[in-house]
């Protein structure tokens, strides 16, 4: 099990001397993920910046300290926007000092940047949106029981954590859609008006075969459209992603989900499967 704090995604297994503390459990990460960069599920031939996984920073909330956990919302699936600070187990004096400073009005993110031993300190302790099953049990219990904007503390095998939940939302959806299901939807004019359709193939591929209504965002040109994705598309709308065989589109679909898109669907088998299974008039290549 990897123990790297890398904004919820795994990395290539490091040498033991480079292991860093983490609150995330990577047993739930699909084994098909590979690579050593934060945008880790892309093929090695595609080099993208680390920024796609840097969470959107909300306005700073003034932290207050709570010695206990709040009640959750029952069984409804939730995702939490969490920031934290980690100190060694033996640094009790530092921990108490940080608690006093938070109670006096200092911001957790500023303190994390200065004192945290977790690599997330580079992001002010921001861990991004997390869900149950991703974190070590002690941290998960504290996070999902914490009142919004309250700083709570918990102890894990890595040391003492001060964590703050900045926001929460219903868990997002990411799933495959079969070619025949998409075909039925495309026949409805309202679907083309209401849904967001994204084709991540290259222009030369789109020239060979295409489907109506899809906006072309070539994956190799990610740097030109990635930073503005939430202004060009509405994260609250259903979003459908397509490529040639469904591999690149799955990569982008996962990234869209990490950017806050609520419902993302990947065309299983890509446009090739659509042509073979549903519409022979669409060329194959």
Image (cartoon, helix red, strand yellow):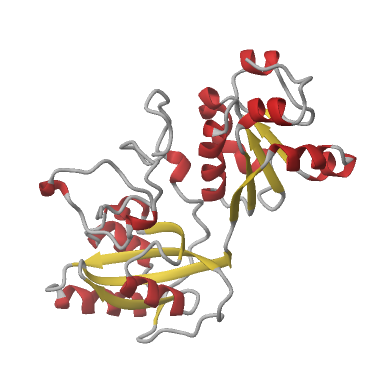
Residue at figure coordinates x 89%, y 39% from the top left? 189
User: From what the image shows, is residue 202 above or below residue 237?
Assistant: above
Q: Position of residue 194 (x, y in %)?
A: 81, 45
Residue shown at 82% from the left, 39% from the top: 192
Q: As rendered, which of 110 and 180 lies closer to the eye?
A: 180
The quarter of the image holding the C terminus is top right
Q: Nearer the viewer, residue 116 or 168?
A: 168
Q: Position of residue 210 (x, y in %)?
A: 72, 22
Is any part of residue 104 visible from this angle? Answer: no
**Where 258 sits versus 84, above or below?**
above
In the rendered image, residue 70, in percent from the top left (x then y), is placed at 46, 84
Query: Is residue 46 rendered to the left or right of residue 278?
Result: left
Where is residue 185 shown, x and y percent of the image?
Answer: 80, 42
- The number of discs equals 0
> Compared with residue 160, is residue 247 higher up or lower down, i.e. above or below?
above
Q: Where is the N terminus found, in terms of image quarters?
A: bottom left
Q: Residue furthest right?
A: 189
Which residue is at a point 68% across and 44% down the rendered structure image? Answer: 239
Q: Is residue 167 above or below residue 50?
A: below
Q: Give the residue drawn at x 69%, y 53%.
A: 236
Q: Residue furthest front?
A: 277
Q: Nearer the viewer, residue 276 or 70?
A: 276
- 265 sits to left or right of 119: right
Q: In the image, 102: left or right of 80?
A: left
Residue 74 shows in the view? yes
Where, by quadrant of the figure, is residue 51 drawn?
Answer: top left
């Amino acid at each position: 099990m990897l123990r790297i704090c890398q904004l919820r995604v795994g990395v290539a297994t490091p040498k033991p001397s480079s292991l860093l503390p983490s609150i995330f459990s990577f047993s739930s990460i699909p084994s098909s993920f590979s690579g050593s960069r934060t945008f880790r599920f892309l093929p090695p031939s595609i080099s993208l910046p680390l920024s796609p996984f840097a969470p959107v920073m909300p306005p700073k909330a003034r932290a207050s300290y709570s010695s206990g956990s709040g009640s959750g919302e029952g069984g409804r699936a939730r995702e939490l926007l969490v920031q934290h600070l980690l100190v060694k187990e033996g640094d009790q004096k530092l921990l108490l000092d940080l608690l006093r400073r938070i109670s006096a009005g200092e911001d957790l993110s500023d303190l994390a940047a200065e004192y945290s031993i977790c690599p997330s300190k580079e992001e002010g302790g921001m861990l991004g949106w997390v869900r149950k099953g991703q974190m070590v049990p002690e941290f998960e219990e504290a996070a999902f029981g914490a009142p919004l904007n309250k700083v709570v503390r918990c102890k894990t095998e890595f040391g003492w954590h001060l964590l703050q939940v900045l926001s929460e939302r219903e868990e997002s959806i990411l799933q495959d859609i079969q070619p025949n299901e998409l075909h039925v939807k495309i026949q409805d004019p309202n679907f083309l008006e209401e849904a967001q359709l994204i084709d991540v193939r290259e222009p030369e591929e789109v020239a060979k075969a295409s489907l109506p209504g899809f906006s072309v965002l070539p994956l190799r040109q990610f740097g030109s459209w990635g930073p503005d994705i939430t202004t060009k598309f509405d994260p609250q709308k259903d979003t459908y992603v397509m490529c040639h065989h469904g591999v690149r589109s799955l990569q982008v679909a996962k990234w869209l989900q990490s950017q806050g898109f609520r419902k993302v669907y990947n065309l299983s088998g890509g446009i090739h499967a659509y042509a073979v299974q549903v519409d022979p008039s669409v060329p194959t290549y």
